[in-house]
Every structure is written in C-alpha cells, then in structure tokens.
Image (cartoon, rainbow, N blue to C red):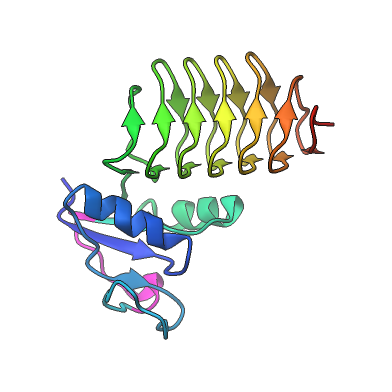
C-alpha cells in the first residue's frame, strides 16, 4: 500500500494530474525536478533530483511527463526503487479495470467495458474509449479524442485532440494522429496521419 506519493515533473502537464489526485482525496508529498520551479501553484515541496532520493518501501511516484518515450525511460529507471501508481479522476467514468502502472485518467474521460489500457498511458480530459478497445503502453489519448468500439492503438502512439478513430481500426506503434482527424482505416506503425478522412 502506498503511503507517500511523489510527483516527477512539475509543469503544465502535471496540473490536471494533481487535481485528479486531489479528487481522490489524496495529495502529493512533494515533487522531483532538476531544479526548483519558480512557479509553484500547488505549493508542493521541492525534493531535488529523484536519483539522489532514498525511497521507502511504501513510497510511490507518478511520472507527469508528456513525452511518451521519456516517460517510459524514467519509469524503467525507477522500477526497482519505487512503486508506480495510477490516478483516476473522480469526475471520469471507468467501466474497465485499470492497472497500477502510471496510468492517468483525467476529468471527464469515459472508458467503457472490456477495454485494456497499457501502463504509463495518458487518457486526457474528456477522451472517450468505447467498448473493447485496446490502448498500448505509453500512449497519449489527447483531450476530446474518441476511440469507437474495438479500436486498437499500439505502444507510444499519440491520438490528437478531438480525433475520431472509427470502429475496428488498428493503429500501429509510434504513430501520430493529427488533431481533429477522422481515421477510417488501419494505420501502419511509425506513421503520421491527419485530416478527414485521415491519410
């Protein structure tokens, strides 16, 4: 059981994460950064660099960094030293089981039954993940994006704000789906698509 919770990364991306944890009636016990932030809107204690910190057995860290690959790199570096945990905003609707490995479900997001959400993944504000979708590890589903039923999104992929992925579409690893796009067919890995229909 996690008794103390620490934030790694303290900038704009972390702010809704902090609010989501507060909605669970919990709070962070401090933050790690390379240097102390001049802007500290949540009055968190600066703890220095995580490499020099001595974690206890019941400590947990949430990595609040938007870059998918950097988030994974830091998670791998810390996995033997400290627990990672997931945060589900109380204003979201989650009807599938969510693992305990660094997932954030922000306010207004909806995750319907029989979905799988991979570790380290961001489900951002008002995103909708419909029934039986699979979202891989270290993905980012941006605000307002919609994954309709049976969609698959592979690891490290970004689905941009207000994009819509139609039923049964499979999106490969390390893709970028442009904001507002409508994806009507499968997308191969390492591909950027945009538009309506996306190409």
Residue 46 placement: quadrant? bottom left
Q: Residue at x 78, y 28 (%)?
A: 188
Find out whether residue 33 is within the magenta segment.
no
Residue 197 placement: quadrant? top right
Magenta span main SS: loop
Specify whether 189 is left or right of 167.
right
Front in this rendered view, residue 76 or 122 = 122
**Residue 182 in the image, given as x and y percentages of width and height:** 72, 29
**Residue 106 in the image, given as x and y percentages of width and height:** 39, 45
Front in this rendered view, residue 193 or 73 = 193
Q: Residue at x 34, y 75 (%)?
A: 41
* Residues in magenta, as a range: 48-59
**Residue 146 in the image, given as x and y percentages of width and height:** 56, 30
Q: Residue at x 69, y 39 (%)?
A: 180
**Residue 185 in the image, given as x and y percentages of width and height:** 76, 19
The answer to whether residue 82 of the structure is visible from this angle is no
The answer to whether residue 69 of the structure is visible from this angle is yes
Q: Above or below — where is 47 with respect to 85?
A: below
Q: Above or below — where is 179 with respect to 3?
A: above
Q: Above or below — where is 96 with respect to 19?
A: above
Q: Residue at x 35, y 78 (%)?
A: 40
Q: Residue furthest right?
A: 199
């Amino acid at each position: 059981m996690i008794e103390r919770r620490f934030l790694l990364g303290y900038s704009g991306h972390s702010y809704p994460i902090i609010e989501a944890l507060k909605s669970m009636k919990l709070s962070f016990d401090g933050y790690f950064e390379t240097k102390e932030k001049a802007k500290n809107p949540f009055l968190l204690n600066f703890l220095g660099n995580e490499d020099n910190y001595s974690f206890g057995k019941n400590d947990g860290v949430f990595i609040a960094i938007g870059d998918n690959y950097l988030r994974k790199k830091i998670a791998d570096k810390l996995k033997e030293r400290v627990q990672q945990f997931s945060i589900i905003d109380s204003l979201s609707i989650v009807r599938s089981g969510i693992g305990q490995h660094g997932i954030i479900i922000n306010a207004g997001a909806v995750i319907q039954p029989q979905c799988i959400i991979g570790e380290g993944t961001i489900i951002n504000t008002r995103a909708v993940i419909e029934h039986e979708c699979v979202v891989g590890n270290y993905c980012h589903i941006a605000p307002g994006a919609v994954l309709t039923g049976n969609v698959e999104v592979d690891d490290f992929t970004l689905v941009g704000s207000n994009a819509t992925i139609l039923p049964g579409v499979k999106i490969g690893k390390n893709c970028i789906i442009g904001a507002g796009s409508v994806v009507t067919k499968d997308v191969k890995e390492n591909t950027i698509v945009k538009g309506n229909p996306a190409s």
